[in-house]
Amino acid sequence: MQFVQPRTFLIGFTEVDEAGLKAYLDHTDQLDFLESYNEAREGGLSPAECLISFYAKLCYKSLTLGKNDNVTRIREIQANIENCFATGHGSVFEHVWFNFVTTNCSRVMTHELVRHRIGVAYSQTSGRYCRLDKLDFVSDPLLKPVEKTLREMITDFEVAYLELCEEVGLNEPGLDFGKKKKLTSALRRMAPNGQANEIGWSCNVRALRHLLMMRTSRHAEREIRRVFNQVYELIKDRYPMLVADAVEEEIDGLLEIRGMKMQQYDVRIADVSEEVLIAELERRHPEIGYGV
């Protein structure tokens, strides 16, 4: 066995069918939007980021001037996206998806990750189909003082597991695959939660921003913090605009991400006066007496 640490890779993302986009714009007499699109692309924005702006402008008929008499000016794509972040127009970010795979992560981490259901999809290593011939283990720095004992326990487990595979007949030549699956599934019940496995997962930008703040929090489990630090760095490196409003702070050697507006009516406490804050707390909890 060996101790391992999770590693996350960005393997896919939403693309734009530019021929289809042009056909729509031509059909609706809005080809001028292509000029903004091309300028944004030349300025470094990805097609996916431009797609966010497309959907935002679609809401207000502001892809080009002249389609909505209430609109007298239109923002360029980057400014439009920045405004969506500032106003919490989060629904438009659900159109763009990123695809990740995380390897050498524990079942502890994946059990926490899959609790997030909205705007996220998962495909995980199957303990029903995949035999534990070799057990790599994701530990925690808190267990460093007992690492020697931990290694011995896991090594003993590996030996016991292989002996059980033999005893239940899992290694018999010509064994039916259906029987193999059932036996493999039964034997996984003894496996530790720290066993290393893989999970492929995808999420839209709105969900991703939420996940980054939830799972890099100082209160989150360390392994999932490590994973989402990696995710944050991947997105910040390739799509910096999508996390441009993030506030970073290093906590215990890992970044904590916060400050990204998620809803239209989100209010930061830092932007609220003490009088307004006390009044709101009094309204919610009059029995406490904040204003006293």
Image: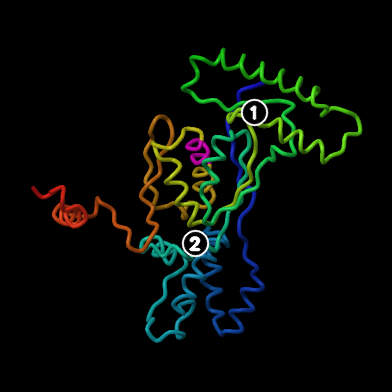
Left or right of 288? Residue 214 is: right
Provide the residue designation for mark 1.
191
Rendered view: 159 above or below 73: above
Q: Is residue 229 magenta?
A: yes
Q: Quadrant of the N terminus?
A: top right
Q: Residue at left 87%, top 38%?
A: 176
Instruction: Say which of marks 1 and 2 sits in front.
Output: 1
Q: Residue 70 bears which disc, if any?
A: none
Amino acid type shown at disc 2 = Phe
User: Is residue 92 positioned above or below 165 on the image?
Assistant: below
Position of 174 with respect to 230 (left or right) is: right
Crowding near pointer 2: few (<14 within 10 Å), some, many (20+)?
A: many
Secondary structure that dominates the magenta span? helix
Q: CA distance from mark 1 to mark 2?
A: 39 Å
Marks 1 and 2, the one that precedes in the sequence: 2
User: Which type of secondary structure does the marked residue at label 1 adopt?
Assistant: loop
Which residue sits at x=54%, y=50%?
Answer: 238
Residue 277 lies left or right of residue 108; in this view the side is: left
Would you place residue 277 above or below residue 165 in this image? below
Q: Amino acid at mark 1?
A: Ala
* Residue sticking out furthest to the right: 174
The stretch in magenta equals 224-230
> Residue 46: image x %, image y %?
56, 59
Can residue 150 be found in the magenta stretch? no
Position of residue 108 relative to residue 18, above or below, is above
**Percent x, y for residue 2?**
64, 22
Residue 93 got which mark? 2
In this rendered view, identify the residue nearer to me: 172 or 34: 172
